[in-house]
Image (tube, rainbow, N blue to C red):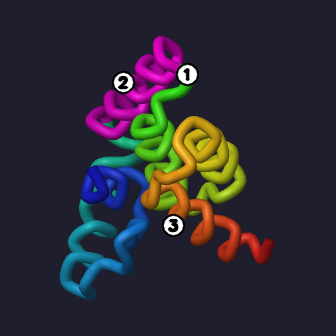
Amino acid sequence: MAYLVAVGFGVTGSVFGRAAPAQASAARQGSQDAVEGGPPAPVMAALQTLRKRIAEHPNDDVALTQLGDMYLAANRFDQAIPLYERALRANPRNVAAQTGLAQAREALGK
């Protein structure tokens, strides 16, 4: 999913770190070719699936974390933080949410 986010939002990293230069170039090129004004269909489908899953199961810490990861990868830190916080309220031991929250807060200087 991180690749889809990288291609869809034109970013070169994820919560797992920066993409290699060759991957970054390919991700940027794919983004330029596929996106005019928004993410490509696969990314939109993943967003819709996660939002639906969260609507049906508001305390699904995995879905909340995955959606937070997508926003983090897209540099939308202000949208990622509340998702990670909700995930951690549901499951304080969610390491991925803890990591994502720390990265998003650091990026915003909080």
Q: Is residue 2 left or right of residue 82?
A: left
Q: Residue at x 59, y 46 (%)?
A: 88
The picture places residue 22, in percent across and down from the top left corner, at 19, 84
Residue 41 horizontal/vertical position (percent): 30, 33
What element does badge 2 sit on? helix
Query: From this viewpoint, which residue is outermost toward the front?
Result: 93
Q: Nearer the viewer, residue 44 or 28?
A: 44
Dot 2 crowding, Cα within 10 Å, few <14, some 14–19, many 20+: some
Q: Is residue 69 above or below residue 27?
A: above
| In contact (CB < 8 Å): disc 3 and disc 2 | no
Which quarter of the picture shows residue 23?
Answer: bottom left
What residue sits right under mark 3 in the picture?
A: 99
Q: Amino acid at mark 2?
A: Thr
Is residue 37 visible from the viewing direction of this image?
no
Residue 45 shown in magenta: yes
The stretch of residues the image draws in magenta is 41-57
Q: Residue furthest bottom?
A: 21
Judged by depth in the image, the label closer to the viewer, 2 or 1, is 1
Residue labelled with disc 1: 58
Of the image marks 2 and 1, the number of the one nearer the N terminus: 2
Which amino acid, mark 3? Thr
Label 2 belongs to which residue? 49
The secondary structure that most of the magenta stretch takes on is helix
Mark pair 1, 3: CA separation: 21 Å
The C terminus lies in which quarter of the figure? bottom right
With 51 as the anchor, is 28 left or right in this view?
left
Amino acid type of the residue that numbered disc 1 sits on in the rendered structure: Pro
The local crowd at label 1, few if under 14, some if 14 to 19, many if 20 or more residues have their Cα within 10 Å, is some
| x then y, percent, for residue 14 | 39, 67
Q: Return the x and y of residue 39 as percentages of the image width and height.
A: 41, 43
Q: Is residue 44 magenta?
A: yes
Front-most of residues 44 and 72: 72
